[in-house]
Each structure stands twice: as structure tokens, then as C-alpha cells.
Image (cartoon, rainbow, N blue to C red):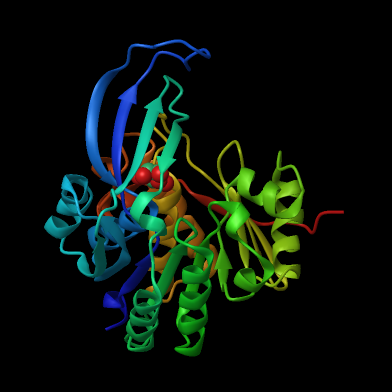
Amino acid sequence: MTSRRPIFSLGSINADFHVRVDRRPEPGETLIGRDFRALGGGKAANVALLAMRLGHPAHLFGRVGNDALAEQALAPLRLAGVDLSGVSPVDGCATAVSMISVPPDGDKGIVLAPNANDRWDEDGIAALEANIAGAPEGAVLVLDCEVPAEVAARAAAAAGRRRLTRVLDPSPAERVDDALLAEADFVLPNSAEAEALTGIAIDDAASGARAARRLIDRGAGAACVKLPGGGSVLAERGRLSLVRAPQVDVTDTTGAGDAFAGAFAVALAEGRDPVEAVRFATAAASHVVTGYGSQPAYPDREDVERLLAGVQAEPLDPPD
Ligand code: RIB
């Protein structure tokens, strides 16, 4: 049944520590925060959790430490029913940690200690490739780059051999090269990542379109560049589309990009057209930014459907 096609999610699994602040701290200052929360997080973990919320089986691949932080990261995923058989503990290493501060405008700042996320060995990579080779027909692989570049590259190549659809979150952008872009059926950069990858500053739909096309020229199958003011530009070969985000009150942007990637993958797994998949992903991400913390703010299908009517898509003329 197409609606139950699984999502394979490879990348970071983090213990998130959130705090609200009234402003960003000055150098050397100790700023008092509030509303402390210790949560599960990490890009791949967030994607997997969202896929489950939207009714798809999710398989997570990554590394945690052999420590108490691993439970903080994994407990919500286990509760949601994410398949964690592809997650291994690394002895003598801490689970990845994100220190997240959220100012009143919701535009969070994150300090990430990658720790176990970067600790893969050859046996682990080979096991990952074998898992992907055995993936069911129609599964979608979502991968971020908060794992070593070789892990992402080999997973993407294995998924290509298995003919899975591959969705790349190119974060951090410095780990993305043309070979990885060429393995991506869809790449979903935010505006900063798009600028880092293409050298084009993104300030409107036209610059977003130029960057998205540049990513296709560099090898990606299609590119969806998120715009700084909300919404995104999707470039496919022969088609450009602008998707506008609905107006919402922003509380915290943490994890919105992961929700976008997860919902986009779910929509593709359900056979939706890429523009419809971007609309669906935009609705999911728009819901997430209204709540504090990433995973606790993740939507179910009803939440997404409620916002979807307010997400408009239109064809875009090619930029000069
Ligand atoms: O993309 C957001 C996620 O990555 C958060 O859950 C946090 O772990 C950050 O590093």
C-alpha cells in the first residue's frame, strides 16, 4: 500500500537543551535564560519522528554515545515506534548535544557538539549499505550531513543502486560536494546553505531560483531553496515553482527544516507531485515554528492538512 511506504532517515541524533532568552548574549556575558527543556533532537531523529506522526514506518540510522544522553535522544523515538535497529552506541563517546537558545523572534541559535554522530567505522557503513540494499520498494531515504561525508556518500550511492528516492538536507554545507549532489534526487537547502553551496545570496524568489538551478547544474535532480522570509522555490528540470508559506506566529524555528524534509519525503512516498510535496512540507514546517522545542511541536496529519489550504504554489518565470 503506497501510503505506508517507509522513510529511511540517516544523520544526526542529538540530546537537545533548549532555553528561552530575551536577547542574544554579548561576548563575555552570562545571560539568564528560562523555560529550560531537555529534549530529543537531531536532524535524522526529527525526520524519523515526523514520519511516524504522519503514519509512515520510519527506520533511523545513526550513532549515539554509551551514556544517559542517549536515552534522552532515543526515548521519544522508541515511544513513537521508530525502528532503531540501525542506531548503535559508541563506547567511550558522548551522545551529540545541541545547546539551543531561542530569542523572542524564534530565530534560534545552536551550538552543536557532534560527538558520536561522527563515529562510524567500516563495519557500520557496510551494515548501513546492506540495510539500504534490502529496503522495500518505494522507500524514501532522507539524509543530512551531520555524519561523516563518506557515510552520507555511500548511503546515497547504495540508495541509488536500490532505486530509492533520495532527499538530501545539505547541512552542514561544507560537507556537501558535487558527487553527493549528483546522488540526490532532491536537495533542500535553507537560504544560508544555498548561498554557501552556490555563492548566490538569497534575498528573493529570483535569487532563490538562480541558486536552485545552479544546484541542478551541479548534479542534483531537483532543488528546493527556502527563502529567508518564508516560502521556497522548487526547481525541477523544465519547471520552476514558487511556494508561499502561510502567515503564522513564530515561537521557535528549531527543527522546522527537519519537519520540512520529513514531510516532503512522506509526500513523495505517497506519490504526490514534487510541487504538492513542497506544499505539504511547508504546511508541516509552518506548524512546527508555532511551538517551543522541535519534537514536542511536531504535527500530526490533521495539523498539516489544516494549514495546507493556506499554502499556495504558482509557476515562476525563469530568472534573468
Ligand atoms: O535541525 C534541528 C536539530 O538540529 C535540533 O533538534 C538540534 O539537535 C539541531 O542540532
Question: Is residue 93 shown above or below 204?
Answer: below
Q: Position of residue 200 (x, y in %)?
A: 77, 47
Q: Position of residue 84 (x, y in %)?
A: 21, 67
- Which of the 4 image quadrants contains residue 74? bottom left
Residue in the picture at 79% in, 59% down:
318
Residue nearest the observer in this picture, 120 or 103: 120
Is residue 14 in view from this perspective?
yes
Q: Position of residue 3 (x, y in %)?
A: 29, 75
> Which quadrant would the C terminus be assigned to in this image?
bottom right
Q: Quadrant of ligand 1?
A: top left
- Residue extending farthest to the right is 320
Residue nearest the observer in this picture, 49 or 308: 49
Residue in the picture at 48% in, 87% down:
163
- Which of the 4 image quadrants contains residue 89? bottom left
> Which quadrant would the N terminus be assigned to in this image?
bottom left
Q: Position of residue 267 (x, y in %)?
A: 40, 67
Question: Is residue 229 shown above or below 285?
Answer: above
Q: Is residue 33 left or right of residue 144?
A: left
Is residue 308 in view from this perspective?
no
Residue in the picture at 56% in, 68% down:
186
Question: Is residue 14 shown above or below 265?
Answer: above
Report the number of numbered marks.
Answer: 0
Question: Is residue 61 shown above or below 175?
Answer: below
- Residue extending farthest to the front is 92
